Amino acid sequence: MDYQVILSPKAVNDLEKIVRYIAINNPEAAKKIGQQLLSKAKELSQFPLRGQIVPEFNDPNLRQLILKPYRIIYRVEQSKKQISIARFWHSSRESLEL
């Protein structure tokens, strides 16, 4: 059975900010990166443990996928068969906040 992928309010806000920022100079690129980030996040429904453990937290349920220069931070909730996308984080930003 596939896992359900859910975006947290912070993740939705992150994605909106990323797309708006890129769209200032390149609306087509903004749309493309937004779609790529969402597509990569949705892939987790099939492969929830695909990402690596987030080094800042060392929690086996908190993982990340990289789509340079972005990190997709997510929590695996195996008992609920659910993936919660916590953040879409640009690698140039300082310390990760959940």
Image (tube, grey):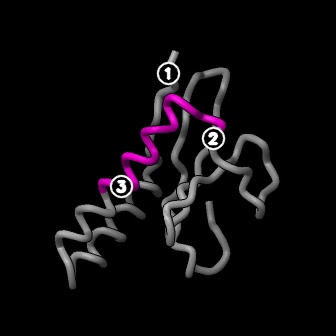
What's the residue type where badge 1 is placed?
Asp
Q: Which badge, 2 or 3, comes first in the chain's sequence?
A: 3
Q: Which secondary structure lies at badge 2? A: loop
- How far from the left and from the top, in percent, is residue 1? 52, 15
List the single residue furthest toward the left.
Answer: 27
> Label 3, on which residue?
36
| C-alpha span from label 2 to label 3 | 17 Å
Mark 3: amino acid: Gln
SS at circle 3: helix
The disc, 3 or 1, on the residue closer to the chain's N-terminal end is 1
**Residue 91 or residue 8, whichever sits in front:** 91
- Residue 36 x, y percent position in the rendering: 35, 55
Mark 1 sits on what residue?
Answer: 2
Q: Residue at x 33, y 63 (%)?
A: 33
Q: Position of residue 61 (x, y in %)?
A: 72, 40
Chain part drawn in magenta: 35-49
- Who's the residue at 52% across and 57% down the image? 87
Per the model, the C-alpha gap separating discs 3 and 1 is 20 Å
Q: Name the residue tied to disc 2.
A: 50
Q: Is residue 69 magenta?
A: no
Residue 48 is left or right of residue 54, and the answer is left
Q: Please, what is the three-letter code of the amino acid marked with disc 2?
A: Arg
Disc 3 vs disc 1: Cβ atoms closer than 8 Å? no
- Residue 90 vs 43, above or below: the answer is below
Q: Determine whether 9 is above or below 21 in the image.
A: above
Are the two marked residues, 2 and 1, in contact with CB atoms closer than 8 angstroms? no
